[in-house]
Image (tube, grey):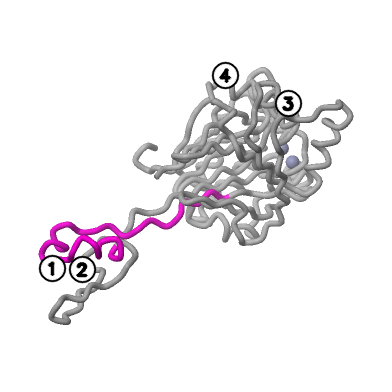
């Protein structure tokens, strides 16, 4: 199963008429996950025809406003539309207070439950179901900021029909083959699982890193993912500014993606000083060839064949 990522916002700091603040929709077969929720994300969801009442899980990276100022508005609209299903919100521990104080002083009581999950950045999954698990890890920003990794669960081995027939493996045993069991024939001969099955299809992974000054300390969390989103706020001639504000240059991001051996890199969180983004793309591509710009309204996938 491929994971797909719809870009809802690609701007750093203030929104402009051309670029919205950071937000993305990560889709699996069963779920829509919202990742960050900058100002006017609900407008973007409408623009790109996302049925946002189907979003049950929202992941917030950090408490800079360009990543969560849209959350209270989105939750309010969900309420006004009569939502009943709970919304699970993952993020730094202060997020709950920041959001709920606004509803408190508005005298609002939402029609659905908000369930807050404090993210610590440990290796244990913060969310899992039978198709995917999500882990959080700390990146390298001025305030505590988390990246999120969406990893498809390991898939079963694939039964090789011809060989299974040849060795007369009964139907009832086939589920065990998928789990890796060897098969023992009636005469006692053991047929190794690797003879009867083929390797599983690979599990897809997507990692999201915003905002962050590119750093090896979170390399292990993004190593080998099929698709990596990483901020590239500035060109490298602004590296002093990037360092001071704990952001990345496109060059640094490209180099980090190469070290992490990812399949594809997606860059975003562009400073408003850039109207033409091609130079940022070219700079990142010098470090890592398979790089794309995060373009609002476009969907990117972990499936290599669809690149
Ligand atoms: Zn930001
Ligand atoms: Zn930030």
Closest to the camera, between mark 2 and mark 3, is 3
> Dot 1: within a 10 Å radius of its alpha carbon, few (fewer than 14), some, or many (20 or more) residues?
some
Describe the element under mark 4 as helix, strand or loop: helix
Q: Residue furthest right?
A: 105
Determine which of the numbered discs, if any, sits on residue 47 in the image.
4
Q: Quadrant of residue 138?
A: bottom right
Which residue is disc 3 drawn over?
Answer: 76
For marks 2 and 3 on the same chain, the one whose residue lies earlier in the sequence: 3
- Give the distance between the C-alpha atoms of the residues marked 3 and 4, in whole angstroms: 18 Å
For marks 3 and 1 on the same chain, the one whose residue lies earlier in the sequence: 3
Determine which of the numbered discs, if any, sits on residue 142 in the image.
none
Which residue is disc 1 drawn over?
Answer: 167
Q: Is mark 2 within 8 Å of ligand 1?
A: no
Q: Is residue 229 above or below residue 140?
A: above
Residue at coordinates 70% horizontally, 37% vertically from top-left?
Answer: 113
Closest to the camera, between mark 3 and mark 4, is 3
Determine which of the numbered discs, if any, sits on residue 195 in the image.
2
* Residue stretch rendered in magenta on the structure: 149-177
Q: Is residue 29 above or below residue 168?
A: above
């Amino acid at each position: 199963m491929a994971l797909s990522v719809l870009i809802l916002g690609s701007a750093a700091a203030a929104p402009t008429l051309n670029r919205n603040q950071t937000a993305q929709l990560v889709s699996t077969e069963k779920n829509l996950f919202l990742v960050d929720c900058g100002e006017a994300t609900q407008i973007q969801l409408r623009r790109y025809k996302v049925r946002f009442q189907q979003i049950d899980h929202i992941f917030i990276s950090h408490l800079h406003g360009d990543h969560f100022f849209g959350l209270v508005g989105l939750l309010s609209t969900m309420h006004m539309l009569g939502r009943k299903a709970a919304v699970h919100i993952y993020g730094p521990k202060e997020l709950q207070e920041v959001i709920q104080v606004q509803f408190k002083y508005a005298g609002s009581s939402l029609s659905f439950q908000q369930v807050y999950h404090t993210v610590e950045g440990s290796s244990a999954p913060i969310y899992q179901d039978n198709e995917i698990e999500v882990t959080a890890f700390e990146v390298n920003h001025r305030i505590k900021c988390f990246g999120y990794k969406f990893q498809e669960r390991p898939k079963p081995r694939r039964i090789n029909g011809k060989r299974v027939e040849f060795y007369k493996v009964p139907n009832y045993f086939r589920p065990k083959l998928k789990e890796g069991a060897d098969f023992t024939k009636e005469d006692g001969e053991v047929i190794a699982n690797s003879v009867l099955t083929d390797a599983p299809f690979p599990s897809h992974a997507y990692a999201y890193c915003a905002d962050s000054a590119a750093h090896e300390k979170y390399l292990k969390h993004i190593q080998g993912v099929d698709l990596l989103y990483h901020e590239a706020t500035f060109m490298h001639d602004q590296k002093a500014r990037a360092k001071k504000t704990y952001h990345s240059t496109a060059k640094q991001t490209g180099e980090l993606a190469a070290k992490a051996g990812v399949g594809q890199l997606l860059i975003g969180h562009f400073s408003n000083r850039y109207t033409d983004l091609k130079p940022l793309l070219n700079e990142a591509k010098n470090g890592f060839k398979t790089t794309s710009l995060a373009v609002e309204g476009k969907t990117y996938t972990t499936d290599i064949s669809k690149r």
